[in-house]
Amino acid sequence: MKNRLKVLRAERDWSQAQLAELLNVSRQTANALETGKYDPSLPLAFKIAALFGCRIEDIFKPEDGEIKTQI
Amino acid sequence: MNENSPTTSSSELNKNLITGAIAGGMAGAAFGYGLGSLWTGIVAGILFGLAIGSRLQRVPIKMRYPMPIIRRILLAAGFCVLVGMGYAVLVDKGWSGMRAILAAVLPIAAWAFLVVTLGMAIARLDELQRRIQTEAIAIGFAGTVIVCGGYGLLGLAGILPAINWGMVIFVMVLMWFVGKMWTLWRYR
């Protein structure tokens, strides 16, 4: 999953530690989210979206070929 | 400030030092008793605990777990070791009947306390930390089955000597550590 967390955080001039504190997670988790190593749970994704005032799909996007729909 | 954003205040350091000293003292008492020098063991344990307590503050913030959780686990582990010493003392008394049974199952109460403490600690972690611990426990469990099962089979075949199966706990802790390092590397 790709995400725009680093850009959104930089726009607000927040450090990773500040972001972690605002989301009530560890800095390790904030870093893993930002680097795309870890995809958040739905509740955390909603929390992130609310924090940045956008929709989840504006922040997280699936990698090419990650989601295949069967018709 | 939430629990996942550890502070580096002196009060945190003091709490870590006190916890380290208590846990180290308990473990030192057990080892000192086993080696025939109780007070030397306690003093060495307290010094070792103080070193661990001061070391906790130097772990990079990014890698740190909430300090209250670490302190609680340290105390529970120290208590476990101390109860192990109590078990050894009581078993040596050569009791029989109900007293012998109670003495024999004494460590189970301490293990249960440690397991509940670990469970409570894991429940208070954030979702990635919880995943890391869960995956580490799964790897630890699978690794222990493979290592101990393999050793047992070789022992049955007469290739390896029989061992004390209490070693399973140490293998489990070692495998959990390997699992934790692996998952930490994955989500680094």
Image: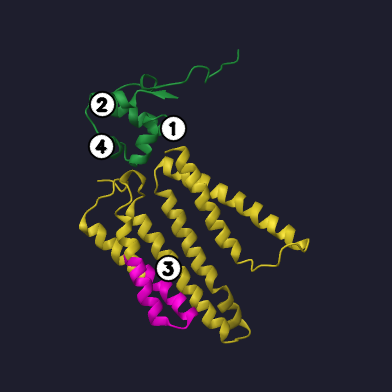
Which residue is the site of mark 1?
Answer: A37
Name the colour assigned to chain A in the rendering.
green
Quarter of the view holding residue B100: bottom right
- Helix, strand or loop under label 4: helix
The residue at the point 54 percent across, 79 percent down is B88
Q: Quadrant of the C terminus of chain B?
A: top left
Mark-to-mark CA distance, 4 and 2? 12 Å
Mark-to-mark CA distance, 1 and 4? 19 Å
What's drawn in magenta, residue-wise? B23-50
Share a chain, discs 1 and 4?
yes
| Residue A25 in view of the camera | no
Say which mark, if any, is on residue B78.
Answer: 3
Share a chain, discs 4 and 2?
yes
Task: Give the residue type at disc 2.
Answer: Ala
Which residue is the site of mark 2?
Answer: A10
Mark 4 packing: few (<14 Cα in 10 Å), some, or many (20+)?
some
The chain identifier of the residue carrying mark 1 reads: A
Which residue is the site of mark 4?
Answer: A18
Mark-to-mark CA distance, 3 and 1? 35 Å
- Helix, strand or loop under label 1: loop
Share a chain, discs 3 and 2?
no
Q: Position of residue A62 (x, y in %)?
A: 46, 21
Q: Position of residue B17 (x, y in %)?
A: 29, 64
Task: Give the residue type at disc 1.
Answer: Lys
Task: Give the residue type at disc 4.
Answer: Gln
**Toward the viewer: B107 or B153?**
B153
**Does the magenta-highlighted stretch encompass residue B25?**
yes
